[in-house]
Image (cartoon, rainbow, N blue to C red):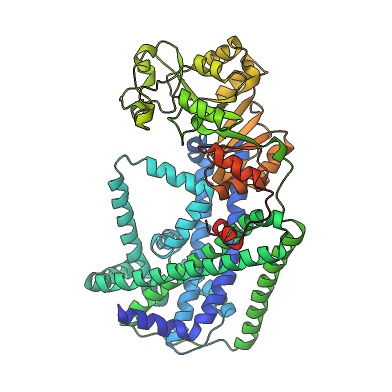
Amino acid sequence: MKDILNSVWKIGKKNGISLILFEVLYRSAVTMTAGKLMDWSIRLLLKRQGFSYLTAENYAKFMLQPLTIFGLFLLAILAALFMLIEISAVFWAVQCSVNDIKVHALVMAKQGIINGARFIRRHPFFWPVYMLGTLPFLGLHFIIWEIINVKILEFTAIQIYNLFPWKWVLVLLCAVVLTGSAVISFSLPYCIEEGMRIKTGLKKAAARLKRRIGRYTAGVLVMQGMTLLAAAAAYLVLSLAVVAGIYLFMKPSARISGVLVYGAQAQNFVAIFSGSAGIVTGLLSVSAVYFRRNPAGSIKASSKGKRARRLIYLLTAFIAAAEAGIFAYHVFYVGRVNNTVLDSFKVTAHRGGALMAPENTMSAMKYAVESMSDYAEIDVQETSDDVLVLLHDSSLKRTTGYNGNIWAMTYQEVAQLDAGVRFNSRFLGEQVPALDDVIEYSRGKIGLNIEVKNNGHNQNIVSKVVQCLEEHDFVDQCVLTSMNYSFLQQAKELNPDIRTRYIMTMTYGGISDIEAADFFSVKHTYVTGAFVQEAHSCGKEVHAWTVNYPGDIKRMITYGVDGIITDDPALAHEVYLDEGETQAGFGRLLQYAIK
C-alpha cells in the first residue's frame, strides 16, 4: 500500500496543478451541460409522449416507453463520451509525469479528445459499455451525490431498492458490480495506453488484481478516504467563508435565508470537487499499479505550454470572478426572504401530529388543535363493511400490531384493536377512529387535509368521502388530497366546490394542464423556487411535506411555499414566527449552512 501511495505522489507531483485546473474547468462545463441537457430531455420526452407531469403515479409507464428508453440510451452514450475524454486526458497527464514532462490543462483536454477518438475507432460498438463500466468504481463519490441531488435519479434509486424484498441480494449485487467495475478500471491503462483489445486488457487486469488484490484494494481505499476527508475539510472552510460573508454584508433579516441558499451552493461546489477528486485519485491509483510493472511509452510535450498556462489561469480567474459577482448580486440586491405568502402561511400537522401522539388517532387530532395547526393531515381508507376510517398503511400491523389488511376487516373488528400502545403506553386503548367522528371533533377547531388512499380495493372510496363531507356540511373546512389524480377528477365531478390537492414526488414537466388540482403537495426535497413561481402563476398553492428540520422549514419559506406539512407543528410555528428575527449569531448560521 505504501508503494502505491508513493507512486501516486510522484505521478501527481509533476502535473498536479494542471490536473486540478483541468478538472475544475472540465467538470464545471460537463456538470452544467449534463444537468441542463437532462432536464431538457425529460421535459421534451414528457411532452412528446403526452405526459403532462412526471409523478410517482406515471413514473413506471413513462420510463418503459420506447422513446424514453431511446432517450436514456443517448444520454448514457453522452455520459460515456464525457468519461472517456476525462480518463484519456488524465492518463495523458500521468504518462507525461512518468516521462518527467510538464503538461497543461488545455493540452490535456486536446489530447483527451484525440486519444478518446482513437479508442472509439478501435472499439466502435463496445466503448460506451466499457466506459460506463468504470463508473461504479471510479465515480462512486459522484454517483452518490448525483442520486442525492438529481431527484429523478433519487426516485429511481428508491424504486430499485424497493424491488428487492431481501436486501442482502441487493448488497451482494452491488459488491459484484463494484468488483467488476474495479477490474474494468484497472484494465484502462492496457486498453488506452497500450491500445490492447478490451478482452485482453480485462484478462491482464484480472490477473494483476488476483495476485495482490489486498494491497491494491487497501491503497485505493486509503486514497478515496483521503479524498473524502479533503472534501469534508473543503466543505467546512467554504461554509465558514459563506457564513462570514453573509454575516458581514447581508441584511440581518435575510441572513438565515441567505445561508440556506448559498450553503446549498457551497455544498454543490464541494460535491463537484469531491466527484472529480474521486475519479482522479482512482485513476492515479490505477496508474500507480500499472506503471510499477510497465514502462511508460515515450511522448512529446506540447511546445505551447506557456500560452496554454496563461489561458487556463485566465479562464479559472474568470469563473471565480463570475461566481463572486453572482454571489455579490444576490447579497446586495436579492438575498431576501420571500415574504409575499407569510401572511397566509399554513401549518399542517402530519397524520394529526405523529411526533407527539399515535398517528391518525383522536389523540393526534387533539394535539393538532392544541398546537394551533391550521390543518390536520389524515389518511382515509375503508373497512369491508364500507366504514371510512383513519389509517395510512393498508395493513394494521405497524400501528396496532395486528397483521391484517383493512379491506378484509369490519369496523367492529378494527375498533377492538389498540392503535396507541405501540406508540406509548400512555395511549393504551386508543382506537382507530372513523372519519365521521373526526369531522365532528374538528368542526370549528381545525381544517382537515384528507388524503384518500388507493389500495386497489376501494374503487368507490372517493364518492363515499365526498358524500360524508356533504352530509356533515364540512366541504368548506377541508381539502381532499391524493397521489391518484383520477381520485381528484372524480371528486371535482361529484362536487366542484371541493378543494383538491395533488401529492407529487417530482417536479418535472408542466403543471398548467393539471386542472383537477387546486393545490400541490410536494415532497420538500423536490421543491424549488422555480416550481413555486410556476404554480403561483397558475393560481395554485404549494405545500411541502414532510418538513421536520428548522433549516428545511426556513428554506421552504424562502422559496415562497404557502404552507408545510410537519410532524412537529410547534417547531414549525416557532421557526415561522422567528423568521424576522435579526439576532441569529454566527454559530447558529453555521448550523444552518452545514446541515
Q: In which quarter of the image is residue 309?
A: bottom right
Q: Which of 461 and 62 is in front in this view?
A: 461
Question: Where 384 falls versus 365 (above or below)?
Answer: above
**Looking at the image, can residue 337 be seen?**
yes
Nearer to us in this view, 50 or 366: 366
Could you say which is closer to the camera, residue 375 or residue 313? 375
Location of residue 265 (image quadrant): bottom right
Q: In this rendering, would 316 be left or right of 112?
A: right
Please report the residue visible at 46 percent of the width from the left and 57 percent of the height from the top: 143
204 lies left or right of 98: left
Q: Can residue 507 be seen in this view?
A: no
Q: What residue do we see at 52% from left, 67% from top?
A: 236
The image quarter in which residue 502 lies: top right
Going by the image, does 559 lie left or right of 397?
right
Provide residue 424's location: percent of width, then percent of height.
37, 32
Q: Where is residue 514 in the image (x, y as percent from the top left)?
A: 64, 31
Q: x, y percentage for residue 264? A: 58, 57
**Residue at x 72% of width, y 37% of height:** 343
Q: Position of residue 347 (x, y in %)?
A: 60, 35
Q: In this view, does 253 lie above or below 418?
A: below
Q: In which quarter of the image is the N terminus?
A: bottom left
